[in-house]
Image (cartoon, rainbow, N blue to C red):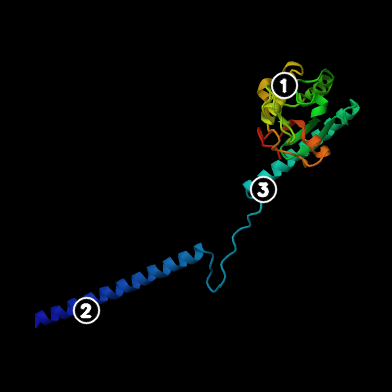
Amino acid sequence: MNTYADMVTLLLCFFVLLFAMSILNAKKFQAAISSLQGAFGIMPGATQPVVPPSSEGLFDPQELQAQLLAEEMARMRALGESFREELEKAGLGDKVRLEVEERGVVFRLADTVLFDIGKADIRPEARSVLLTVGNLVKKVDNPIRVEGHTDNWPISTDKFPSNWELSTARATNVVRFLIEEAGIQPERLQAAGYGEYHPIDSNDTPEGRQRNRRVDVILMRPSLSAAEPH
């Protein structure tokens, strides 16, 4: 009899314990659910999550980069206008064409201004033109790129087997002049020859070919130390 009573008592205790554990787990579960709802911004009785704070004013790398580029280009355009006025005052508006491109300020000189046909030696009367350009670009510390370009008419001489050699020699001679005569630091300068492969006009007309035969002296954007021609 005692054994039976003891067994019933133990069973009763066991079921009481199970009941208590179920209540405890339910409370813990409900607490966890409430915590998750709070974390996701869901309040009791609400059906929509809380809208997160506005991102206005947060750092946006792409927007900042675009703003810096716009400011840099504005400075280059202002610099280009200043240089254009100086060229006009010097009476060189018809010999030096100035353009502001994404890569920087471009001083565009026709080959007939600087060289004889098929030659790379700078003509004596062109020295004052180049010196004026050199003195202008020397006013700022931007890198300078000198590019030689030709039309598509082939050249084949002992000195210049192709337009590659001719355009490169012309660019190199202009760089040497800017160093020796204009006093520009060599580390600021680059020279490149592109032959006929970067025209700015059609090679089907004499006028187009004349425009393509040129030397570009480019005052680069500060953030762009090197760039390929357009």
Q: Which residue is mark 3?
A: 63
Identify the element where label 1 is drawn: helix
Q: Which residue type carries mark 2?
A: Leu
| Camera-nearest label, 2 or 3 | 3
Q: Quadrant of residue 196?
A: top right
Q: Is residue 84 left or right of residue 46?
A: right
Q: Are marks 1 and 3 in contact (CB under 8 Å)?
A: no
Which residue corresponds to mark 2? 12
Most foreground residue, 115 or 17: 115
Q: Describe residue 71's horizontal placement relative to residue 207 as left or right.
A: left
Instruction: Determine whether the residue tagged by mark 3 lies in a helix, strand or loop.
Output: helix
Q: Earlier in the sequence, mark 2 or mark 1?
A: 2
Q: What is the quadrant of residue 74 in the picture?
A: top right
Query: Is 58 drawn above or below residue 150 in the view shown?
Result: below
Percent of width and height locating residue 13: 22, 75
x then y, percent, for residue 6 = 14, 78
Indicate whether 31 appears above or below 168.
Answer: below
Task: Please name whichever residue, 196 or 7, is drawn nearer the observer in this view of the structure.
Answer: 196
Within 10 angstroms of label 3, few (less than 14), some, or many (20 or more) residues?
few
Query: Counting residues from the N terminus, which is met first, the one under dot 2 or under dot 3?
Result: 2
* 2 or 1: mark nearer the eye: 1
Which numbered dot is residue 39? none
Label 1 to label 3: alpha-carbon separation: 42 Å
Q: Which residue type does callout 3 highlight?
A: Glu
Point out residue 45 in the picture as x, y percentages from the top left corner.
54, 74
User: Looking at the image, which residue sits at the far top?
Assistant: 180
Quadrant that contains the C terminus: top right
Say which quadrant the N terminus sits in: bottom left
Q: Which residue is mark 1?
A: 173
Give the distance between the C-alpha atoms of the residues marked 2 and 1, in whole angstroms: 107 Å
Residue 41 found in image quarter: bottom right
**Count the marks: how many?**
3
